[in-house]
Image (tube, helix red, strand yellow):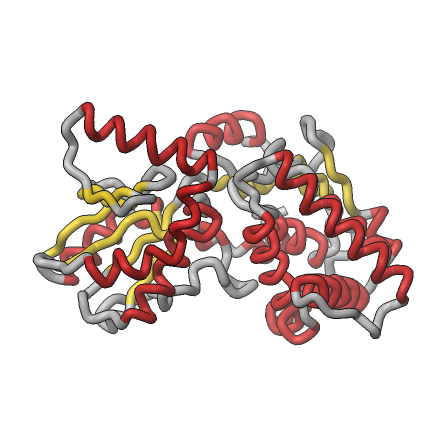
Amino acid sequence: MTLEQRISSFASLGQVLHAYTNSCDLKSLDPAIWETSRNLIEKAIREAEIENPWFTCDHILQMLLYWGNNLTDERLVDWLDPYRNGILSTRDGKRIGVVMAGNIPMVGFHDLLSVLMTNHTLVARLSSQDSILIPALMNCLMLLETAWKEKVNLVTGKISNIDAVIATGSSNTSRYFERYFGKHPNIIRKNRSGVAILTGMESQDDLEHLAKDVFIYFGLGCRSVSKLYIPKDYDFTPLNKALLTYQEFFNHVKYRNNLDYYKSLYLVNRIPFLDGGFYLLIEHEQLAAPVSVIHYEYYKDISSVTRSLTQHQDQIQCIVSLDPGVEGTISPGSTQNPALSDYADGVDTLRFLLEKI
């Protein structure tokens, strides 16, 4: 396939996802392919919810909507254009192993897209927590372009006969990845978190957007905000009001179990916390927080926060703030809507695939 054919097929998949998530027909596609694709997606959503109760229908649709919006001709071309010469010179692609995580729906899809767009062959080990959605989308993709059957290998066991590896996991599993895949060129990712720096001047709309950064995907994503930096004498009332948008999480069994566990743990150990009803706010220096818990830390001035973040930059995926004095921040509500060029851990995946193998 030419680069243009690869872009076109993924853009067509984007049209399928956009039409599905917006509940409209896709008249530009062969009716039989559209109907089959729609059935594949519907079946995958049902089965994925059963496989992993953390993957609610709403959250799966949120991720499908994201990819429907980003898999367009324009966005794919803009993303790939700086690498075009390198991609065109990659005639004999390598076999790239991708070990996918399963913390949020389809979290490995960007790696998949990067491998296939650079003319390599994908050998992906699916997470046992997310083994249904990506195969369903690949089946849709192969309906649109049958040539992909020669380039996509999805497995649930060990991967072998590979030339390079991209592996995503926890800080614990990364040590295993480094031992097992150390002889190959690799990208090995560890735990990271999102943080937010608040000034107390945020509007209610800003805080409602921040609530999305905290709670979408139950806060399980590496871009989810789990730590708040707040000024002394911060008034939690507007924030608590904004967070109430997600109070239905109280009815989710696995989320509620986490809430009950940590609330009991803090009570037994006499650790003070603010009880938001369906979440707990606890003053803590750690960036990562358990499900249902939000850490916060007071600051005297922004410079002290930026110094702290610099010291822990290898644990941070993104920083949310409206303060102009902090560099490299994103606006509230955008943590789970990264551009295609916003690479996990700040490591340029395309450059790795084109120059390091």
Q: Percent from the top left, x then y, of residue 162?
A: 70, 36
Q: Residue at x 67, y 37 (%)?
A: 131
Q: Vertically, is 326 above or below 182?
A: below
Question: Does residue 7 appear in this view?
Answer: no
Q: Is residue 91 left or right of residue 190?
A: right
Question: Does residue 188 appear in this view?
Answer: yes
Q: Is residue 44 left or right of residue 353?
A: right
Between 238 and 310, the one nearer to me in the picture: 238
Q: Vertically, is 243 above or below 260?
A: below
Q: Residue at x 85, y 48 (%)?
A: 149
Q: Residue at x 83, y 53 (%)?
A: 142
Q: Vertically, is 87 above or below 279?
A: below
Q: Is residue 150 left or right of residue 203?
A: right
Q: Is residue 33 left or right of residue 309?
A: right
Q: Quadrant of the N terminus?
A: bottom right
Q: Percent from the top left, x then y, of residue 132?
A: 70, 40
Q: Percent from the top left, x then y, of residue 337?
A: 50, 62
What count of labels does the image hold? 0
| Residue positioned most to the top | 268
